[in-house]
Image (cartoon, rainbow, N blue to C red):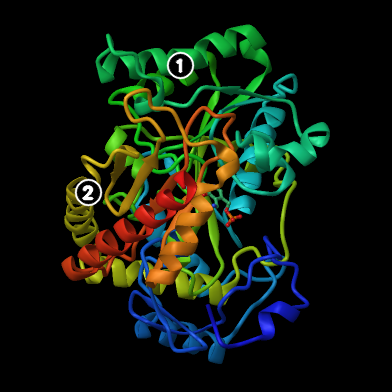
Amino acid sequence: MTSDPRPNRTHILHRDPSRVLPVAVAGDGPFVIDSAGRRYLDASGGAAVSCLGHSEHRVIAAIKAQLDRLPYAHTSFFTSEPAEALADFLISRAPEGLEHVYFISGGSEANETALKLARQYFWEKGETGRRHFIARQQSYHGNTLGALSVGGNPARRAVYEPILLPVSHIPPCFDYRNRRADETSEEYGLRAANELETEILRLGPETVIAFIAETVGGATCGAITPAPGYFRRIREICDKYGVLLILDEVMCGMGRTGTLFACEQEGVSPDLLTCAKGLGAGYQPIGACLMSGEIYDAITQGSGTFQHGFTYIGHATACAGALAVQQVIEEDGLLRNCQAMGDALGAALRDRFGDHPHIGDIRGRGLFRAIELVEDRAAKRPFDLKLKLHAKIRAEAMAEGLMVYPGGGTIDGRSGDHVLMAPPYIITQAGVDMIATRLAAAVDRAVAAVMA
Ligand code: PMP
């Protein structure tokens, strides 16, 4: 893969130490360049992070300028201009009711913050018996213990299961896998949402803190869009029982699906909303947890202190970088490109894979798309998970000079391997065509290898 021998002798504990990774040394728009000079088209934005590609000079200049002025000042002593400006930017565009924000360094911290804000909200109100979270199977919310507890990916949870929080997991709203043939999408969305009510009643409404879900499902099952009306019914159920709604938009938010917040397209506002990846676009590590005025007031007018915090909350340079990212997206009209190129990518994938015997589903919204692989298309039967088809596709794609984010093969056989795509919002039609061509070659070689 690379002529640089050092990755074999690394001191770093990599996720999969048996793999020899190329060394990334430079960025050029949507391309990452390795130490051997190979160029990789970043069709996944890393893990749906790099929404402006890898060389946006306006963002780099804003970060440099902030570093020259003030890199960081601890929030026990100061607030900072970039943090206040980023908060104003986000809240003035946020779904109705979200009035305040808490800045942290990434997605897991954002969800950890949301879970704790939700619990403290009820504690402030004297409803201390509320101790349960409800989440969904086949979901991902992060790696810290609270976020992992609400996550519904059995492989990621397995090692830690005995030390996780008790959380109920209801089935996700997953049309391809879970809608019955005799149901319309709307009927299915209602049935899937009603699972939440059943679980709240089983636990006892007075014991439930919040329901957490990704607005559009990401890493664990690949660009799962909700059925029409699903989240409106979820909102109704939460309101009926006084349960908070947390939407995790760490992956699908910040424009990825064509609107700044994915829930805008569902017509709902959550009580807490988390975002991260596209917020800083990889130029800085940053996440955010947006909260309703009611939650903010309960804490600030109650005990007065949110019992939580990290050294790097509201990091001035990270906030300056994120503000510049968001300004570039807005000034360049990139959400429109996200919608247009998202449609183009959807069409290119349907064109390449619509009749493919081993592609069961092509799905997604905006520049957040996925294909799901199956051994038997009519029966929707996944490949044997032990074949690790998704990992083979990633390797073949890298050999083609294409970065895609494969997953699956971990979900108790309930869904198959998938390949997630989340290209930068600056992608062009030529880039979209390159993704489809290279991915088709990678899929065909990987499928041939597992079927040999
Ligand atoms: N939530 C979702 C939906 C995610 O996709 C991720 C990251 N893949 C996280 C939370 C965790 O974010 P981080 O890795 O930045 O902690």
Query: Label 1 amino acid?
Result: Ile
Q: Residue furthest right?
A: 162
Residue at the image point whose x is 70% and y is 21% from the top:
130
In the drawing, does residue 129 fall left or right of residue 427?
Answer: right
Q: Is mark 1 within 8 Å of ligand 1?
A: no
Query: Label 2 amino acid?
Result: Gly
Q: Quadrant of residue 104?
A: bottom right
Numbered tag placed on residue 237 in the rendering: 1
Residue 279, visible in the rendered structure = no
> Which type of secondary structure does the marked residue at label 2 adopt?
helix
Residue 27, visible in the rendered structure = yes
In the drawing, does residue 20 fall left or right of residue 331?
Answer: right
Q: Position of residue 408 (x, y in %)?
A: 52, 42
Numbered tag placed on residue 130 in the rendering: none
> Which type of secondary structure does the marked residue at label 1 adopt?
helix
Q: Quadrant of residue 434?
A: bottom left
Numbered tag placed on residue 346 in the rendering: 2
Q: Which label sits in the foreground, 2 or 1?
A: 2
Estimate the spatial distance between the alpha carbons at disc 2 and disc 1, rounded to whole Å: 33 Å
Q: Are marks 2 and 1 in contact (CB under 8 Å)?
A: no
Front residue of 307 and 327: 327
Q: Position of residue 292 (x, y in %)?
A: 49, 39
Residue at the image point whose x is 59% and y is 85% from the top:
70
Front residue of 96 and 403: 403
| Mark 2 neighbour class, 10 Å CA radius: few under 14, some 14 to 19, many 20 or more | many
Q: Position of residue 74 (x, y in %)?
A: 70, 71
Residue at the image point whose x is 65% and y is 13% from the top:
206
Q: Residue furthest bottom?
A: 68
